[in-house]
Image (cartoon, rainbow, N blue to C red):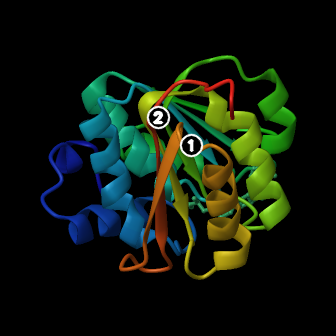
Amino acid sequence: MTTGAQLEAPIDGRGFARAICQALPGNTACSACLYPLYMAVIELGATRILELGTQHGHSAAALLFGAKETGGFVVSCDPFENPKTPAGLQDLGQADRWCFVKMRSQDLGPHWQTTLDLIFVDSSHKAKQTAEELELFAPHVRVGGQIYLHDTVSYEAGVWEPVVEYVERKPRQWDAVNHTEVQHGLGIMTRKAAVNPAE
Ligand SMILES: C[S@@+](CC[C@H](N)C(=O)[O-])C[C@H]1O[C@@H](n2cnc3c(N)ncnc32)[C@H](O)[C@@H]1O
């Protein structure tokens, strides 16, 4: 059994992802982005973190390891709930900074009010929905905050193209980089400036 104590200071990305995957149910397709997510939380000093698309909780765990260090909190949103995930997060020592919202992102978005430091998007991978998620949640990201999106290579049309379309409409507010070297692709959007009335 993997314990939180063993993972207090993850040594390298592979060991970190392996330990998370062993503690939680199911297989993950995003093991390559678990350590980058953890590091993103630390580097941004992120305390207000939102995840869209939770499934088994692997990425939630990575975000929570970071949140434990920053004193932050992670809200995960998914219309489906894996009943084994809370116990797995408990085994990892990562259940107390987590809130699971059993809901579709597009239903949560209109009610969202909290400013965010970091969002991780790993939901439907469909272009219309990704575009809706950006419209609903990106305005809540603080200047200097980021949005990470998984599968920008394996679902280029469903994930990366809507990112490009969004950023091209708001070039003063947003930058985006597609890390195609990460398995399945990892997009990173960075908020450069507050709302610009011209955009
Ligand atoms: C690829 S899995 C996420 C994997 C997860 N990040 C992990 O590390 O285990 C995609 C998830 O997105 C969820 N999803 C699909 N449509 C969604 C929506 N409209 N809002 C939120 N989540 C959604 C699915 O239920 C599924 O659990």
Up the image or down, 96 lies above or below 146; here it is above
Q: What amino acid does circle 2 point to?
A: Ala
Compared with 85, 72 (above or below) is above
Left or right of 87 in this view: 94: left
Q: Quadrant of ligand 1?
A: bottom right
In front here: 145 or 104?
145
Q: Quadrant of the N terminus?
A: bottom left
Q: Are marks 2 and 1 in contact (CB under 8 Å)?
A: yes
What's the residue at 23%, 65% (across, down)? 13
Residue 117: x percent and y percent? 45, 30
Q: SS at mark 1?
A: helix
Q: Which mark is residue 179?
A: none
Q: Which residue is mark 1?
A: 86
- Horizontally, residue 184 falls left or right of residue 20, namely right
Q: Give the structural element (helix, strand or loop) at label 2.
A: loop
Residue on which the image places disc 2: 95
Q: Is residue 91 left or right of residue 50?
A: left
Q: Position of residue 37 (x, y in %)?
A: 38, 52
Tell me what residue is drawn at x 45 percent, y 27 percent: 143
